[in-house]
Image (cartoon, helix red, strand yellow):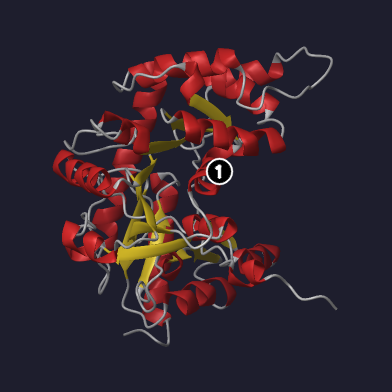
Amino acid sequence: MPEISQRGVQMPASPIRKLAPLSDAAKAQGVKVYHLNIGQPDLPSPVTALDAIRSIDRTTLEYSPSDGYRFYRENLTTYYKQYDIDLTPEQIIVTAGGSEAVLYAFMACLNPGDEIIVPEPAYANYMAFAISAGAVIRTIPSTMETGFALPPMEEFENLINERTKGILICNPNNPTGYVYTPQEMEQIRNLVKKYNLYLFSDEVYREFIYNDTPYVSACHLEGVEENVVLIDSVSKRYSECGIRIGALITKNQKVHDTVMKFCQARLSPPLIGQIAANASLQVSSSYMQHNFDEYKGRRDFLIERLNKIPGVYSPMPQGAFYTLARLPIDDADAFCGWCLSDFRYEGQTIFMAPATGFYVTSGLGKNEVRIAYVLNKEDLDKALTVLEKALEAYPNRR
């Protein structure tokens, strides 16, 4: 039998989904599983988007332009202007989710063997996209004790060599919820400028910043406009993960034109998704405020409850809708699997994401989990009770 590719062998399993078979088996037994593992918002998608889908009267569902419909890109420029990001429609490429935007950014900007520096923990799929592009991720650990603040610039400079081509950040951060300060963003800008690096900036959670830290986009940084590749998505801000609409934004014409080659090869971003995403731009401010208030309330409730469980600690996330929690266990992968396969409390269990999958450095995150607060407070309360009981019963508690 022919062998699997080395790329396929190196591709990591998703820490978010790899335990799904255990979850499915528990559900088949009639167990209530609380999903804390994945950032799938439970809040309703905008009525404007749902109505737009219901109102589709096309007789043919055709390809769209490879960079997305112009009317949608024009409307996106108005959306970004709210955040003092000035763009033209030609600087926006509509993608099949933010994931495709990251992959195409890597494919366009990096050669096999090129390196990008990423503060860790980081979104697990970045590693998968780097492997797909033949690139190498070099990481610098941030720490729970600092709330996962940006590591010192000296640590970045220690990793820079002739193969280093870029820095990747997620702001607000998944999985930590950290929001980079203006000072930290300026430090990143200076490093990018000094070494002529790309700055890949994933900013899909900009609507959800709960403290007083101002949102500083990579597009706000002066003097590195052509180094920046911005990644965006409607999945989180509009609860529209399933329509698979994202965006790659760049003012670098060569990067734009190169990305377009990959876009043309896949022909078209999703037609119906663009219709829904475009309609979502008309959503009321009250919809966005309600979602913001709901996530902020869940965050406050979650962190207070977590830190009351003996041996558990989580810093207060500043944005997005995730937190990393340290548990009194030996192995998060084993514990999360055990919760699904062996532990039941009143017919319930929990599905969490082991944090090891968000680190590249071996050994980090062994006793940490990522928790997404995408359940209502009542279900969050029940899930945290299950977690507390699971920790009491776990045979390898530390």
Give left or right: position of 121 versus 51: left
From the top left corner, tell me how far across and down residue 221 is, in percent.
24, 33
**Which residue is located at x 51 percent, y 67 percent?**
346
From the top left corner, tell me how far across and down residue 138 is, in percent.
37, 64
**Which residue is located at x 42 percent, y 87 percent?**
395
From the top left corner, tell me how far across and down residue 254 is, in percent.
49, 33
Q: Which residue is mark 1?
A: 104
**Which residue is located at x 53 percent, y 74 percent?**
337
Q: Is residue 21 above or below residue 103?
A: below
Near mark 1 (Cα within 10 A), the count class, few <14, some 14-19 or many ≥20, is: many
Q: Residue furthest left?
A: 183
Q: Residue furthest front?
A: 162
Image quadrant containing the N terminus? bottom right
Q: Secondary structure at mark 1?
A: helix
Q: Is residue 58 above or below residue 365?
A: above
Q: Foreground residue, 286 or 13?
A: 13
The image shows a total of numbered marks equal to 1
Q: Foreground residue, 25 or 97?
A: 97
Give left or right: position of 62 versus 160: right
Q: Is residue 370 visible?
A: yes
Give left or right: position of 227 versus 57: left
Q: Foreground residue, 211 or 192?
A: 192
Q: Is residue 238 visible?
A: no
Q: Is residue 256 above or below residue 136?
A: above
From the top left corner, tell me how far across and down residue 21 is, in percent.
66, 67
Give left or right: position of 75 versus 179: right
**Which residue is located at x 22 percent, y 58 percent?**
315
- Res 267 quadrant in image: top right
Image quadrant containing the C terminus? bottom left
Task: Tell me the amino acid under the disc marked 1.
Answer: Tyr
